[in-house]
């Protein structure tokens, strides 16, 4: 990387090199039986150069011909993509505990044994089909720039995603556990999945209408994607955010506090710097319902005369290979602050309503407007504080700027889930369409 | 390269092994509004090895040639672990040994077109909406993906094939006060750069629609009879039925397998569905899949009866059904999985006007905004729709999302138009992205569809 830096520096004003090395093992159990083991050894380099205020960008998997790699970035300068931002000099960052060396000796056999253990516990107690996705991963990132920044981080991950499936499809009750090292899935987690599934094992067909709706951690991404969009510096710059004028104003219910915290290293994947070398921070998006901040990377903060908030990440909505993606504003470690009700208290408080345990089609619909309209996959129907069955062929729809104003209560614990770590949240008066 | 690959897998001590090496050249030009956000071409590459040993099948993807030995020992270890844990040893269906080089015929090779010309045409289409008041911004992307694939297996197959995909697509966004609307616009395909030329009309048409949407009312949630236009009927075919005909998705689900037995009457008599990657000049065209099997046109539904499904060598063996050549990877980072190639509803006899008269009252729903499926349940979004009253098109409405159950909906397809149209832009995410996923249909009528309203 140093040689590459030397070559690139000679022909440009500013240089940034990002490298990623990744080792992954993924294990799939379907119907309580091992189905697949898939491994990946991936690496690559991403190069940004800035010359005369213009950006050059290139990436490669193998650093064989450094001159050619730099030339590729130089070629892309000709397009004239504006880049007026400076690369940061970042040092003396807090030391985070992101790597547990025991991950190196963790074998796939041990993970398979753990999956078999879970199947043995769940199988006798449920009629539902059991699927598991488990695995381990080690990521090494290094980032250097021509301003003297030289940062690196190594992260270890273990995850186990357990689900019990409803007949006829992929609709399920599920939960994931994630750690920096191998750890058995706690009984509490397995009991939650088992009890919730078993209480709702019968199909019911309730009437639609406006009702109380409990979003689980697993489905809150439907609402959060819309908030991500609205609070991004990119959306502000493109004048697409419907809340661009609402900073400091109350936009949601006062029970909602939402923040991005890459520094929280009890969870795996903590980061002290973003993918362009800006320091990460505990960052409030929303406090007690009041919009506190928009988030920026170097590029969009510069365009809007702000400072980067440390949110430049190489991520895309559909995953993708991070070395091939330029940093853009991204909420990498999103949390919703837990409330004061247990899950069972939340369920008991519902006279008539549904739990949304799975959602289909969160990406369609008018995201800039904050609208959502999702297939319930499944919903669990509640009457008089009891889960009475599961509902198919139904939809829930609304707009986050209306729905998130009507929070009844928030669960007292958060769980890692799709695109963030969330507690369950109970909303009032959400529109649900069913066939009856 | 093929010789190098042969030499790498010659060291593997297993019943079966294959290796795929690919280079992937991506050219991207991205506009956000009038501003150019990204431009450039990059080449990445990597290997995927698959090993079958004693009934265990495992795969590994790696990017450094020096990692080959480590990768092989890793995959062998995983295959052995699987073999120890499966009840029934995994087998691969027999297939012919193929030695072939297939480079598709192109109407203008994008590799021969300068990046300046690509920039110019992208900028031209991006500029069409931006001329109008009421358009707040656009995202327009030129994407060219050139995959050069080299495939070798220990049965003797040696295949070299190129897949070339080009497209210009994006989102057009309109705004009035706090109301924001968006539609998608795009052109593209798999047979060369020429199909990107002279397509101003697509961007003009979509600009008018997104401006009209600012004046449209939201749909009221409920159950409707609907006509789907070919674009969204194609997405329906892909999402609701197509994924269910991918054998790997139902292989280990006893409840789904029970419903999806060949011979089951799933749809109305009017319904015939085929997946045919071999038709030239459509987005999903390929000759060999990523396990070296020749792609075949596969009848899935005939007069509403399930007559076939899409297979890999593994599932064809386990279901004891014919190979179809549908096991495809996104790129060198992935082992192949079963994907649709080009799925469509065969056209019937009715004109669009006849469908409107038959519908009488309901909704005419147009153009997809993405969909998702989970076994028998599906949801997908539409860009816009019109109210139909007494067989006549009325006011435009917005915020359309459709949800339903596969079996009920297939039975509720009552009438099929004569105007088959295949999509030009694909994008199916089943763990991996498939930008060449092609689907299509004529106009169709579906009864009793759930529409989620606000």
Image (spheres, grey):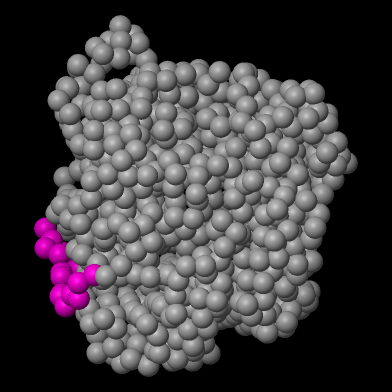
Q: In which quarter of the image is residue A241?
A: top right
**Along the viewing direction, whichever of B189 and A393 lies nearer the viewer:** A393
**Residue occupying the point 70% across, 53% down:** A124
**Along the viewing direction, whichever of B106 and A230 lies nearer the viewer:** B106
Could you tell whether A330 is left or right of A263 in the image? Answer: left
Q: Is residue A236 above or below residue A212?
A: below
x, y percentage for residue B245? 36, 47
**Residue occupying the point 65% across, 41% down:** A357
Q: In which quarter of the image is the C terminus of chain B?
A: top right
Could you tell whether B295 is left or right of A200 in the image? Answer: left
> Magenta region, mostly helix, strand or loop?
loop
The residue segment tinted magenta is B95-115
**Residue occupying the point 66% across, 25% down:** A430
Q: Is residue B449 above or below residue A107?
A: above
**Along the viewing direction, whichever of B419 and B191 lies nearer the viewer:** B419
x, y percentage for residue A423? 76, 46
**Residue occupying the point 50% across, 18% down:** B222
Q: In which quarter of the image is the N terminus of chain B?
A: bottom left
Could you tell whether B412 is left or right of B146 in the image? Answer: right
Most extreme residue toward the top is: B390
Is B109 inside the magenta-drawn segment? Answer: yes
**Along the viewing direction, whichever of B317 and A141 lies nearer the viewer:** B317
Q: Quadrant of residue B190?
A: bottom left
x, y percentage for residue A161? 64, 58
Is A282 inside the magenta-drawn segment? Answer: no
x, y percentage for residue B370? 42, 41
Let me know if residue B249 appears in the view: yes
């Amino acid at each position: 990387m140093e040689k590459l830096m030397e070559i690139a520096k000679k022909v440009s004003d500013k240089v940034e090199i990002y490298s990623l090395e990744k080792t992954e093992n993924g294990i799939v159990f379907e119907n309580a039986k091992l189905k697949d083991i898939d491994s990946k050894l991936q690496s690559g380099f991403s190069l940004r150069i800035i010359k005369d205020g213009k950006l050059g960008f290139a990436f490669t998997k193998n650093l064989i011909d450094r001159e050619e790699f730099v030339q590729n970035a130089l070629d892309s300068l000709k397009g004239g993509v504006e880049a007026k931002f400076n690369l940061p000099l970042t040092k003396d960052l807090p030391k985070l505990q992101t790597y547990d060396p025991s991950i190196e000796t963790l074998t796939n056999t041990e993970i398979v044994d753990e999956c078999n253990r879970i199947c043995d516990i769940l199988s006798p107690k449920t009629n539902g089909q059991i699927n598991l996705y488990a695995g381990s991963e080690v990521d090494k990132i290094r980032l250097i720039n021509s301003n003297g920044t030289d940062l690196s981080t190594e992260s270890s991950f273990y995850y186990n995603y357990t689900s019990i499936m409803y007949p006829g499809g992929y609709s399920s009750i599920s939960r994931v556990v994630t750690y920096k090292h191998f750890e058995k899935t706690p009984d509490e987690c397995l009991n939650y999945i088992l009890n919730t599934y078993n209480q709702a094992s019968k199909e019911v067909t309730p009437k639609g209408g406006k009702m109380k709706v409990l979003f689980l951690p697993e489905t809150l991404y439907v609402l959060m994607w819309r908030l991500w969009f609205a609070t991004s510096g990119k959306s502000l710059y493109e004048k697409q955010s419907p809340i661009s004028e609402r900073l400091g104003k109350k936009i949601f219910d006062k029970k909602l506090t939402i923040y991005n915290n890459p520094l929280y290293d009890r969870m795996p994947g903590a980061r002290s710097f973003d993918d362009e070398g800006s320091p990460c921070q505990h960052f409030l998006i929303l406090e007690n319902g009041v919009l506190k901040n928009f988030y920026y990377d170097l590029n969009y903060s510069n365009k809007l005369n702000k400072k980067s908030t440390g949110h430049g990440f190489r991520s895309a909505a559909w995953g993708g290979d991070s070395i091939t993606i330029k940093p853009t504003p991204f909420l990498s470690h999103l949390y919703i602050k837990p409330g004061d009700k247990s899950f069972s208290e939340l369920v008991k408080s519902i006279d008539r309503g549904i739990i949304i345990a799975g959602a289909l089609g969160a990406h369609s619909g008018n995201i800039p407007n904050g609208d959502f309209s999702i297939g319930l996959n499944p919903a669990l129907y509640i009457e008089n504080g009891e889960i009475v069955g599961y509902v198919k062929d139904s939809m829930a729809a609304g707009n986050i700027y209306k729905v998130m104003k009507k929070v009844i209560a928030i669960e007292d614990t958060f769980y890692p889930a799709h695109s963030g770590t969330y507690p369950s949240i109970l909303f009032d008066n959400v529109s649900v369409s069913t066939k009856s | 390269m093929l010789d190098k690959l042969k030499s790498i897998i010659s060291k593997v001590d297993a019943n079966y092994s294959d290796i795929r090496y690919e280079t992937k050249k991506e050219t991207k030009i991205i506009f956000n509004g009038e501003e150019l956000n990204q431009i450039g071409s990059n080449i990445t590459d990597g290997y995927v090895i698959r090993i079958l040993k004693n009934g265990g099948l495992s795969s590994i993807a790696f990017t450094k040639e020096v990692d080959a030995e480590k990768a092989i020992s890793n995959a062998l270890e995983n295959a052995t672990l699987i073999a120890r844990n499966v009840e029934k040893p995994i087998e691969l269906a027999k297939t012919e040994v193929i030695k072939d080089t297939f480079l598709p015929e192109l109407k203008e090779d994008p590799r021969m077109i300068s990046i300046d010309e690509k920039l110019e045409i992208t900028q031209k289409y991006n500029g069409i909406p931006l001329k109008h008041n009421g358009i707040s911004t656009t995202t327009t992307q030129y994407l060219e993906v050139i995959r050069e694939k080299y495939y070798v297996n220990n049965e003797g197959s040696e295949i070299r094939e190129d897949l070339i995909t080009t497209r210009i697509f994006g989102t057009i966004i309109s705004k009035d006060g706090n109301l924001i609307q968006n539609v998608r616009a795009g052109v593209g395909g798999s047979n060369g750069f020429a199909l990107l030329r002279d397509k101003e009309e697509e961007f003009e048409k979509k600009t008018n629609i997104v401006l009209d949407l600012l004046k449209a009312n939201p749909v009221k949630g409920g159950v409707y009879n609907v006509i789907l236009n070919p674009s969204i009927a194609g997405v329906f075919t892909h999402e609701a039925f197509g994924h269910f005909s991918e054998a790997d998705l139902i292989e280990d689900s006893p409840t789904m397998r029970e419903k999806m037995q060949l011979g089951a009457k799933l749809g109305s008599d009017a319904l015939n569905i085929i997946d045919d990657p071999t038709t030239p000049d459509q987005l999903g065209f390929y000759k060999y899949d990523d396990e070296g099997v020749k792609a075949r046109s596969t009848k899935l539904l005939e007069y509403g009866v399930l007559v076939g499904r899409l297979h890999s060598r593994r599932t064809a063996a386990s279901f004891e059904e014919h190979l179809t050549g549908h096991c495809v990877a996104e790129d060198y980072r992935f082992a192949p999985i079963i994907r649709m190639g080009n799925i469509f509803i065969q056209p019937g006899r009715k004109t669009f006007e006849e469908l409107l008269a038959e519908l009488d009252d309901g909704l005419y729903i147009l153009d997809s905004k993405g969909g998702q499926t989970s076994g028998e349940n599906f949801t997908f979004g539409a860009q816009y729709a019109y109210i139909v009253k007494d067989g006549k098109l009325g006011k435009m409405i917005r915020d359309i999302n459709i949800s339903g159950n596969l079996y009920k909906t297939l039975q509720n397809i009552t009438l099929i138009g004569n105007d088959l149209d295949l999509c030009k832009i694909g994008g199916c995410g089943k763990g991996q992205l498939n930008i060449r996923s092609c689907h299509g249909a004529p106009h169709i009528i579906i009864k009793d569809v759930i529409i989620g309203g606000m």
